[in-house]
Image (tube, grey):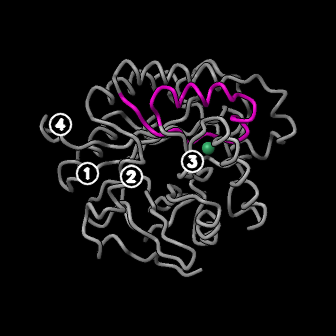
Amino acid sequence: MTVPAEDAASITNVLTVDVEDYFHVSVFDGILPRAEWSRMESRVCRNTERLLGLFAEYGVVGTFFVLGWVAERFRELVKRIAAGGHEIASHGYAHRLIYDQTPAAFREDVRRAKALLEEATGRPVLGYRAPSYSITPRSLWALDILLEEGYRYDSSIYPIHHDRYGIPLSERHPYLIERSVGTLVEVPGSTASVGPLKLPIGGGGYFRILPYCWTRWGIARVNRREKLPAVFYLHPWEIDPDQPRLRAGGLGTFRHYRHLDKTESRLRRLLASFRFGPMETLVTRARQQAWDVDSARVRLPYCW
Ligand SMILES: [Zn+2]
């Protein structure tokens, strides 16, 4: 299935990168203590530079959710991303799953990351994405803390079933979450709607492990049928087939290493086929009621 040229050209999708190293990934939490991180060979700078070069080649800017741990060690990298015209947002500091933290520890984590990123760029950091989309029904309290710490949008709730994340009944497109401490814009991971099914088409493992035509079909479907943008995400380590191998469980190893050698060529096809821009543009539209306000102010199907 192909998307008509006028549809592909008229809708600007959202391009996002979660800037972390290969050893930060949650699947390795159980086998690599955080104290070991600084002894690992770091490849995040060179991989991110490659992505920056690729995006420049296609004239695309996006949003980079940078891990505070990375920003603390590689401040120049953050500055170079920002100098390329990209938006800098936060991926937290220590890549801990939110539902494994106390609210106090989470507050400290997002505060520390925000301060590091703002110090590097001199600009306010308004967006946040949780490690492994870990805002779920048991960690919704995190949304209040994000507001209190000065974040204005979140991109951590995936409206699907997954063993590590997801709120299956939540909205598929950006919506406002109103709390007593303020209003947060939530930008969910993208899905294609087929009958009762919500199929994840937002990038990452879905982009790498499944055939390329899955993502192309899904984004085209959202653009064409719903006239709305899709949100795509990627990690720098996903274009690095030569990264050192770490041993996780069978499924984790499969998910992490599958098709690392195919990601770059697929990404080139994607960038040539669709328009992309940063998340802040979409968030501004959501706040300015690009779609009708009543449907945008949907409540989450849970209380906290
Ligand atoms: Zn991550």
Q: Secondary structure at mark 4?
A: loop
Mark before the other along the chain sequence, 2 or 4 = 4
Mark 4 vs ligand 1: CB under 8 Å? no
Report the mark closest to the observer, 3 or 4. Answer: 3
Quick check: 189 above or below 63?
below
Left or right of 300? Residue 57 is left
Any part of residue 251 in sight: no
Between marks 1 and 2, how big is the CA–CA gap?
A: 9 Å
Report the mark closest to the observer, 4 or 1. Answer: 1
Left or right of 166? Residue 20 is right
Question: Disc 1 marks which residue?
Answer: 222
Mark before the other along the chain sequence, 1 or 2 = 2
Q: Which residues are magenta?
A: 60-86
Between marks 2 and 4, how big is the CA–CA gap?
A: 18 Å
Between marks 2 and 3, how big is the CA–CA gap?
A: 26 Å
What residue type is disc 4 on? Thr
Report the mark closest to the observer, 2 or 4. Answer: 2
Q: Nearer the viewer, residue 125 or 264?
A: 125
Report the mark closest to the observer, 2 or 3. Answer: 3
| Residue 176 pos. (x, y %) | 41, 68
Question: Disc 2 marks which residue?
Answer: 190
What residue type is disc 1 on? Val
Mark before the other along the chain sequence, 1 or 3 = 3
Question: Disc 4 marks which residue?
Answer: 2
Q: Secondary structure at mark 1?
A: helix
Pointers 1 and 2 in contact (CB under 8 A)? yes
